[in-house]
Image (cartoon, rainbow, N blue to C red):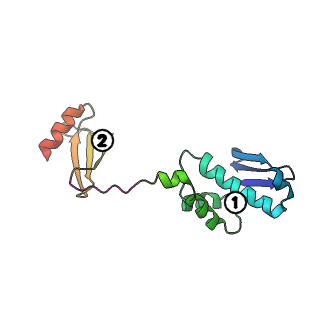
Amino acid sequence: MVYSDALLSGLGCVLIQDEKLIAYASRQLKTHEFNYLTHDLELAIVELILYEVHDNSFPMHLNGMKMYRDLQELHWWARMKREIIEFVAKCLTCQRVKAEHQVPKWKWERITMDFITGLLLSANRRNVIWVIVDRFMKSTYFVAVRTDWSLPKLAKVKWKNN
């Protein structure tokens, strides 16, 4: 839940989840803001909430829709979705750090691997399945291995089974 307030001397908002303080933000009014109407001060609170959630509450910058969904559970204001998406679109960090979609150009250029562990020993004393996925070919390889094998041994077994 986000609690916010605009007083005659400052702005403040508090993010509380399960009755525990998650984040808070406040600031004093600037000299020219003392003459603002309450409605305008509430808009300043919205900006403060957006800044705190997008830049400070998480180790990463959320995209507009993710930030909207997260905030929607806690708070609501008119034109909320549009304001959040516009706010994120203006974020210089988000514009610089957009990750490109990495598409491999040839087989075995990009692979992903995982291990399925905790299996019973097979007849040839192997208890792990090594899963290898070729991102270009979208093909999957399953290799039975042992937990105590070294990396060179794993590579040797993989290329032998290829």
Q: Residue at x 83, y 60 (%)?
A: 36
Q: Name which residue type carries label 2.
A: Leu
Q: Name which residue type carries label 1.
A: His
Residue 57 appears anywhere in the view: no
Horizontal arrangement in the rendering, residue 57 relative to residue 16 (left or right): left
Q: Nearer the viewer, residue 55 or 95?
A: 95
Q: Nearer the viewer, residue 148 or 112?
A: 112
Based on the displayed image, in which of its 4 quarters is residue 50 positioned? bottom right
Q: Relative to 114, does residue 105 appear above or below in the rendering? A: below
The residue where tag 1 is placed is 75
Which of the marked residues, 2 or 1, is nearer the chain's N terminus? 1
The residue where tag 2 is placed is 119
Coordinates of residue 145 in the picture (x, y in percent): 22, 39
Horizontal arrangement in the rendering, residue 92 relative to residue 71 (left or right): left
Coordinates of residue 11 in the picture (x, y in percent): 79, 51
Horizontal arrangement in the rendering, residue 22 relative to residue 26 (left or right): left
In space, the residues marked 2 and 1 are separated at their CA atoms by 47 Å
SS for callout 1: loop
Based on the displayed image, in which of its 4 quarters is residue 119 positioned? top left
Badge 2: few (under 14), some or many (20 or more) residues near its Cα, within 10 Å?
few
First to last magenta residue range: 100-107
Badge 1: few (under 14), some or many (20 or more) residues near its Cα, within 10 Å?
some
Coordinates of residue 51 in the picture (x, y in percent): 65, 52
Q: Residue at x 68, y 57 (%)?
A: 74
Based on the picture, tell me whether residue 38 belongs to the magenta stretch. no
Based on the picture, tell me whether residue 103 belongs to the magenta stretch. yes
Residue 52 appears anywhere in the view: yes
Prevalent SS, magenta region: loop
Coordinates of residue 154 in the picture (x, y in percent): 21, 37
Q: Residue at x 25, y 38 (%)?
A: 121
Q: Residue at x 39, y 55 (%)?
A: 100
SS for callout 2: loop
